[in-house]
Amino acid sequence: MANANDLLKNVSATVPEKVGDMFKVGFVIDCKFLVGKSAEAIFGHKWKFALESPVFERMFCGAFIEANNSTEVALPDDDPKIFRILRRLLYNFREADVTSLSFEDTSNLCIMADKYMVETVVKLCCGHLFTFKERKKQIKLFALARKLQDKFLLYKIELILKIISYPLHVAQNELDSNCFFF
């Protein structure tokens, strides 16, 4: 594992590699997110999260406890795995890629990004979710669109359901029968 001095010496490393090393050793980090029920420590920078998310901006710059130079932020309702993916995307959005994520991970990331109002990640996730063509996943996507109350996403999924000859009222009935949860 690298230490702070190794980070400064490795001038040939790319920016994402250096940031990754900073996270590992907590170098120049001003925030530790305690994520999930197990309070897993995930390091970050307040400025980066505040820049990308209005929710974090209010948290760090508003009247919340975290704004008073607190370095720890408890996020007990979030999944550490999904939060690490969100963090990676926030720091490296130009090369952001979610195509390797499963439908479930992409859906959960979309929900988390919506929760923290990170529109760029929500759009990235929605684009990837439309690549899943199985009927069951399209129904789950319809459920996600309803949960997020995203009119554009709902409209798009309704079009897809029509294209695959799956009546909207049937999809609605499947959802209403509590078959699908996130």
Image (cartoon, rainbow, N blue to C red):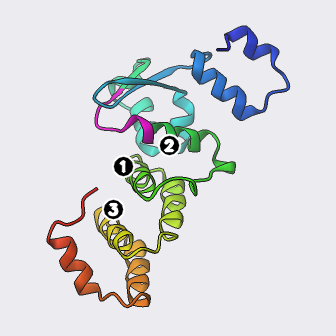
What residue is at 46 percent from the left and 74 percent from the top?
133
Image location of residue 72, percent across then percent down: 40, 20
Spatial CA span between label 2 and label 3: 17 Å
Residue 180 at x, y = what percent?
A: 24, 64
Count of numbered marks? 3
Mark 2 neighbour class, 10 Å CA radius: few under 14, some 14 to 19, many 20 or more? some
Quadrant containing the N terminus in the rendered view: top right
Identify the element where label 3 is drawn.
helix
Amino acid identity at mark 3: Leu
Q: Does the magenta stretch include residue 76?
A: yes
**Residue drawn at point x = 33 percent, y = 62 percent:** 148
Q: What residue type is labelled 1?
A: Lys
Q: Are marks 2 and 3 in contact (CB under 8 Å)?
A: no
Residue at 55 percent of width and 40 percent of height: 51
Residue 173 in the figure: left or right of residue 88: left
| Separation of residues labelled 1 and 2 (CA atoms) | 12 Å
Residue 28: numbered disc: none
Query: Which residue does the numbered mark 1 point to in the structure image?
Result: 115
- Give the Cα distance between marks 3 and 1: 9 Å
Q: Is residue 48 left or right of residue 75?
A: right
Q: Give the range drawn in magenta.
A: 74-82
Residue extending farthest to the right is 12
Please give the residue where the numbered disc 2 appears in the rendered image. Answer: 86
Label 2: state its secondary structure. Answer: helix
Q: Nearer the viewer, mark 1 or mark 2?
A: 2
Work out whether 107 lies above or below 38: below
Secondary structure at badge 1 equals: helix
Of mark 2 and mark 3, the one earlier in the sequence is 2
